[in-house]
Amino acid sequence: LNFNSDIDIVLTYRSAGTAQGRRQLDAGQYLTQVAQGMIKRLDQVTAHGRVWAVDTRLRPFGQAGALVWSVAALETYIVSEGRTWERYAWLKASHAAGDEPTSQTVLATLRPFIYRRYRDYGIFDSLRALHAKIDGQAKRFGTHQDIKKGSGGIRALEFLVQSLQLLEGGRITAIQQPGFYPALHALSDHQLIDAATHRAMDQSYRFLRTLENRLQAMMGQQTHILPTEPSQRAILARLMGCSDIATFDELLSHHQQWVHQQFSQRFLESSPETTGQHLVKIDWPPTEEVVDQLTDRGLSAEAARALYEALDPLAQRLSKKPLSAEGRLRLERLMPLLINELIKHNDPMAGAEDLLRLIETIAQRSAYLALLYERSDILAHVVVVFLNSAQVARWVIESPQLLDDLIDPTHQNTQPLAPVLQASDPEHGLNALSRWRQTRFLKIALAELNRDIDPMVAGQALSRVAETTLQTILEGIDPHSPLAVIAYGNLGSESLHYASDLDCVFLHACQNPDHGMARTAQRMITMMQLPLPGGRLFEVDTRLRPNGRAGLLVSHIDQFAAYQHHEAWLWEHQALIRARWVAGDPTMANAFEDIRQEVLLQPRDAKETAEALWAMRQKQKGERHESALKQRLNDIQFIGEWAVLTQALETLELRQARSVDQQLAHMTGLPRTLTDDLRQAWVRLLKAQHHAFLDRHPATLSDETLRRIDEHIQSAWQTLLA
């Protein structure tokens, strides 16, 4: 507050009931009278002045609205009527007096309105309107007259900070601060503004607010208009520590120009109108003239007609949707930009249908329309991604919040911390975990699409996601559980695919069989497979446990060891090659690995083992439906696993080799040229498999390449079986 500030308050209550007096007023009527009495005592001018000027116009509907609002009515208003400027107003709200739990309830209720869960680029429209209003006032009253609402003033500086809070605060709760300085520091801490901007904002705000305070103290009234009379201006200059008016004016101009420049850059240069971007005129809603507009741009008549015939039904469907006026305006501005971006590419129809499905999905979430309109780079990136990957397009259409993750298209494989699963609110934790998994999958997929990482690196990154998910859920259920999760299959070998399920076995070393571990494991599986807004976390397959479906869900480590030594089939030893500890009791990692090593180091006849594996592989081919790529990958995998089963006793490296590439690199029994050919084939097949899943138009391996790979596989088996 300043010396002459008024106080902006909203009065609210959460109790119902009736007053016990003669008139038996309901809660709203009674509390309105209490509020009127309080405001009168504060605001009434007496011989000694008044306690404080009170402004209640920030309440719903302003002066036309009720003076006192119930929490429920306030929430209803905000949901149905809340406007952008009210988000800015409530951003600065905090408890002032009265029943604090009620204040906290109100603030908690309104937080999702203030801080949207996803970035809301719609705020830029309102800020551009504000900028125009400020500039208009500055032209009428002079640039340096109003230090609050004028160009480069306090209001513009506050909006620079608050806009970032509104944009990012739904995802980064630490920046949900009502005060300017706490918010500024939090934005800097989270690298949403750089150090130089932080320092300049701090200096400008400190100068302007100090000037505001000293101006009001000098004038004895609430004002933001600088005096023009030289003697008063000279006094103000001295109050600000300046030797003369010229020095003061120069310092003031420096801060105002910097703020004005920052505001203009942030809110005026992002839209196509202000960047001077050349756009081909495209009608929206589309008319028959769109065909000519598209052919004038260079599209063939056939492509132009096909695009129009996709656009027109969309426009008709959207015309029947209950879009807000703001949403419809955003749609009308975005669609020509989207079409212009689409037709820059050689085959615009490749991803057009998916892009239009996305628009239909997000049409009633106008913040996303604003995002794509405001950020031409994001729009261009979305178009490219949709043209290149039907799979990623499907993910984004099903979960449009993934658009936020395209804002920062860095595809590093370092993972942000996964959300913590709280026992008190598992539903919220699971939804957050699902969102985290989706983001990680998307980032890894984009990196693969850009050829920044190869499938083996992608498989490792996807495996880290699965491991973290398992650990997070287990800790959420019981942070002290003695349960250990052993991963088999693709997760065990750190070669997870986007569509892989998780082969898991649950072990423990607890002497108390009634520790509830089976219940914990079952809850874990259930949580992993729940249908969440972002899709299931992972499918879990437990059939590789001892005795398969007929066996216990959770086994004691000693029982597991005895089974592996005395009862397990060869195929179970083969499965053990790729197995490893991934979550739960860390002391079990070494215990499990000791058992695995003991089993793999058993002496086996090379030819008999090859014959058994060959028979198993032929049986698999007869019982499973495998794609041509998957079939060849499995054939090579069996060759590598033969090496582990028969040579681990003599070759130290094979004892730890869980990936096929490592197994082939260290095996003997085949000519080195042949194992090198198999390794190259494995890499090429794996790459083809990943890109067959991700790419809209994947490059296929030639018939000649596949023929050579088949020859290498056949030659290897002939040698092993000879």
Image (cartoon, grey):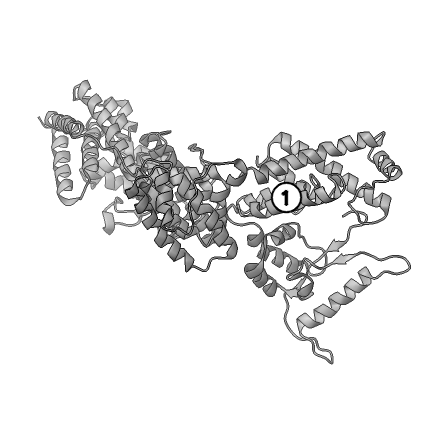
Q: What residue did someone put label 1 on?
A: 131
- The foreground one among 496 and 473 is 496
Residue name at image x 20 percent, y 23 percent: 677
Type of amino acid at the residue the image marks with label 1: His
Residue 373 appears left or right of 196: left
- Give coordinates of residue 121: x percent, y percent: 53, 45
- 37 relative to 458, above or below: below
Element marked by disc 1: helix
Q: Is residue 443 left or right of residue 109?
A: left
Most distant residue in the right direction: 47
Q: Nearer the viewer, residue 260 or 222?
A: 260
- Seen from this angle, which residue lies furthest left? 722
Q: Position of residue 173 (x, y in %)?
A: 57, 45
Q: Position of residue 432 (x, y in %)?
A: 46, 48
Q: Where's residue 616, x and y in %?
A: 14, 38
The residue at 28%/50% (across/down) is 552
Residue 566 is drawn in which quadrant?
top left
In front here: 100 or 342?
A: 342
Please name the residue shown 60% across and 65% down the image: 73
Tell me which corner region of the image, top left, top right, bottom left or bottom right, holds residue 36. Answer: bottom right
Crowding around mark 1 (Cα neighbors within 10 Å: few <14, some 14 to 19, many 20+) is: many
Between 352 and 709, which is closer to the camera in this rendering? 352
**Count of numbered tags:** 1
One can see residue 479 in this view: no
- Seen at 32% across and 32% down, the residue is 455
Q: Kindly tell me whether residue 291 is visible in this rendering.
A: yes
Q: Would you identify the image quadrant in which residue 461 lies?
A: top left
Q: Residue furthest bottom?
A: 22
Q: Check the picture and name the quadrant holding the C terminus.
A: top left
